[in-house]
Image: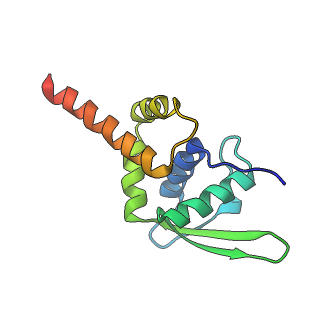
Amino acid sequence: MKIIRLNNDCVRDLLLAIEENVGLKEYMSIDSLQLKSYSQDDLQYTALKLEEVGYINAKVSKYLDGSMDIYIFSLTWNGHKFLDNIRDNNVWSKTKGIVSKFASVSLDVLEKVAAQVITNMISQQIGQ
């Protein structure tokens, strides 16, 4: 059994790909997507978790042989909010630097750290 862990870079890259490839009247199959060096298992697992947490609207069909189809229809409001917090490469880099000091952090914590990083950057800009 292969252990699959949620990869925060895969989370970000998948959310960006969904935003880029899914239109108002379009959807995307996770199997049609190829991102960086992520395996299909990584992409499927990430999509499942993003659907569970409510960041994407998706239809998941699981089959007896262990395979599955995942069709992604849109980002949710919370998905857009999270993506907006981690979209900027500078914010993402600083956020990853902060959370890298810990063995793992949840998506909720990652979202809060990214929001705080942005808030601090804005405060610095206002203070100048």
Q: Quadrant of residue 95?
A: top left
Q: What residue appears at the point 50 percent right and 54 percent down from the top-left corner?
A: 20
Q: What residue appears at the point 41 percent right and 47 percent down from the top-left corner?
A: 111
Q: How many marks?
A: 0
Q: What residue appears at the point 74 percent right and 49 percent down from the top-left corner?
A: 39
Q: Name the spot of residue 114 as percent of width and height, x first.
A: 38, 41
Q: Is residue 25 above or below residue 123?
A: below
* Quadrant of the rendering where the C terminus is positioned: top left
Q: Quadrant of residue 64?
A: bottom right
Of residues 63 and 104, the one nearer the viewer is 104
Left or right relative to 67: residue 118 = left
Of residues 32 and 128, the one nearer the viewer is 128
Q: What residue appears at the point 65 percent right and 69 percent down from the top-left corner?
A: 70
Left or right relative to 47: residue 1 = right
Q: For residue 33, say whether it is visible.
A: no
Left or right relative to 7: residue 85 = left
